[in-house]
Amino acid sequence: MYNKLKIFDSDAPALVKRKTRVAKRILTLRESLRQHFAESTSGEDRLESVRIATWNLREFGGGKCGGRDFEPLYFIAEVISHFDLVALQEIRGDLYEFNELMEILGPAWDYIATDVSDGDAGNGERMVYAWNSDRVRFRNIAGELTLAENEKIRAAFGERLKLENGAKLKLPAGTDLSGVYDAGLKKYSATHKKLRKDLEITLPDGSSLELPDGTQVVVTKGAKVVSPGRGEAEIDMPSPEVEGEQYRLRFPGGTFDDSMRQFARTPYLIAFQAGWLKLNLCTVHIYYGADDDPLKMEQRRAEIEALTEALADKADGEFKHDDKAFLGVLGDFNIVGRGHPTMQALENAGFIIPDELKQIPGSNVERDKAYDQIAFWKPKRRRGYARLEVLGANVFDFFEHVYTLDDEPLYEADNDTRFTYKNWRTYKMSDHLPMWIELKTDFGDEYLEEIG
């Protein structure tokens, strides 16, 4: 819907100049997208295929660097409009900008979103699917994927105990942990900032914990004991220190921080149909953590492994009766690269990344990280007349056409001086490139042959 670019007599000269620039850049985008798909696909009739993308839109709706006004929204909408279904990550709680984007896409486009992820690791984000209803049909099934109690993720960097409700940390005499530490920060007010991530301080030897009221010592099941009478056990408890593999502490409910036991951002599972092709798709945004922190890297791997195992269980369970549908997972996995344990965790449960996508060096702007992926569970198995036939796949680099490096002087007045232009422009578009795959959807011949 390009009507917002119409130039009126009342428009200020600067606005006229900007609308003109946006219109010209959209024309460039349209032509480059047409050429991109022509070079990346087998040239099949688009009435017989569906084009699916995943795109992490950096902090969309977060307001950083002034947020996104009509210029980047039009560029983003133009890119999205060349797909039929897009899984979007990092959509923030405030949907004002997103609704503006949907208005530009037009009345044929619809969307469904999760609620905002709880906890610091979730970063206040939503998972969103947007689709062109002229090309794709929502099959009325949607749900967030959560883990069963016995399958919950263990925090790789240790369990976190809440120091409240009676739990107290006692430091050795004379110890003062006050000081200046390296930290990730975000602006809170004119005089204060907030921690952007947990600040971890190693405790000195001799530190101790005062347990909250209601804590119990547990002698574990299977321990050998003396029985003085029926239904009685005589316990020889060590004193004054209790330790050993047969003893546990049971804390009152709410003592532990369980935010890392589920996914940092809850995966979102949706059922769609395009033509004859039925798809159950799950979009994800896996926990990030620093690349150079081995424990947080392990947390990434554990999340991916838990995700794929849970989805494989669904495929063998409730989706078994949907015998014409395929199961796919797509999104920002924060996978470091080929051969890395984070990639192996994705592929270990039967999920296969199409060869066409394996050729892509990276989906981040620098093209050196395999963060974004699209994979399908056991894609070669027969589903009656239907099959997963890949007609094309790639990533589209929009920075070759909008907000280019040569454009820096154009945006000098808009650029937040706290950011370099190369970083600033990622808050207008994204620091991820859209990754896409095109699949065959017409199996009329195969259906008739099956009957015949």
Image (cartoon, grey):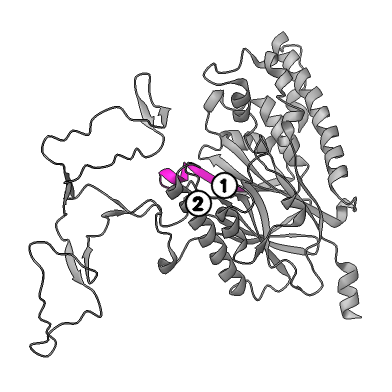
Instruction: Tally the marks.
Output: 2
**Position of 85 relative to 281 (above/below):** above
Q: Mark 1 and mark 2 in contact (Cβ < 8 Å)?
A: yes
Seen from the viewer's position, the closer of residues 405 and 18 is 405
Q: Residues within 10 Å of mark 2 (few under 14, many from 20)?
A: many
Left or right: 388 as drawn, with respect to 334: right
Left or right: 122 as drawn, with respect to 433: left
Q: Position of residue 7 (x, y in %)?
A: 77, 18
Q: Quadrant of the C terminus?
A: bottom right
**Position of 160 relative to 345 (above/below):** above
| Circle 2: residue type | Arg
Seen from the viewer's position, the closer of residues 171 and 189 is 171
Residue at figure coordinates x 87%, y 43% from the top left: 39
Q: Which residue is mark 2?
A: 300
Q: Which residues are magenta?
A: 118-128
Q: Which residue is mark 1?
A: 334
Residue at figure coordinates x 72%, y 17% from the top left: 18
Per the model, the C-alpha gap separating discs 2 and 1 is: 8 Å
Q: Quadrant of the N terminus?
A: top right
Residue at disc 1, secondary structure = loop
Q: Can residue 132 be seen in this snapshot?
A: no
Asked if residue 126 is among those painted magenta in the image, a careful observer would answer: yes
Asked if residue 217 is among those painted magenta in the image, a careful observer would answer: no
Q: Position of residue 183 (x, y in %)?
A: 38, 32
Left or right: 205 as drawn, with respect to 69: left
Residue at disc 2, secondary structure = helix
